[in-house]
Image (spheres, helix red, strand yellow):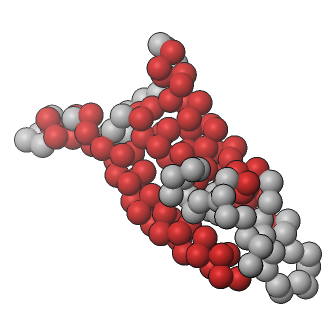
Amino acid sequence: MGDDGPWVESNLFHSGSVEIGPPGDVCRLLLFFAGLIINIHNDHLLRSLRKPGEVHYRIPRGGMFEFVSGANYFGEILEWFGYAVAVWSLPAAAFFLFTSCTIGPRAIHHHRFYQQQFKDYPQSRTALIPFLL
């Protein structure tokens, strides 16, 4: 072990390990998998909006799109939040933060676009976080 051993061995610089143990661990993993499922399902809904050759926009419906405009983004953020709290490490927390800061504003932009594009866009939908933002 060289002079940098304590830094390299520090938990702050490793992704950690996920061990299923106390109920809290299971809950954190459930957050990750719930986000993953939401992300995949809502990406599928988006891809299914247009038939081949269509070029016009449609209002996404179903899944988390009933609550937020950026349903796939919400799922991805929830997914990486679950991962970050499950492994409890600085790199995972940074990845969650950077992901949120990158796709959060995209969800807000998409929400504004939908509101401008469609006069009948559901007013109860928020941009990213159900009932809040």
User: Residue 13 location, x and y as percent?
Assistant: 27, 42
Left or right: residue 88 compared with residue 110: left
Question: Quick one: which residue is furthest to the top in this view?
Answer: 22
x, y percent for residue 34: 64, 38
Query: Which of the 4 image quarters holds residue 110?
Result: bottom right
Compared with 58, 6 (above or below) is above
Q: Position of residue 86 (x, y in %)?
A: 45, 32
Task: Give the total number of marks visible in the rendering.
Answer: 0
Q: Quadrant of the N terminus?
A: top left
Q: Is residue 40 visible?
A: no
Residue drawn where x is 91% and y is 85% of the image: 53
Q: Is residue 20 left or right of residue 39?
A: left
Residue at 80% in and 54% down: 62
On screen, residue 108 above or below 113 = above
Residue at screen point 73% across, 70% down: 121
Q: Which of these two is toward me, 20 or 6?
A: 20
Task: Answer above or below: position of 25 versus 57.
Answer: above
Left or right: residue 6 versus residue 54 is left
Evaluate whether residue 4 shows in this view.
Answer: yes
Q: Position of residue 32 (x, y in %)?
A: 56, 38
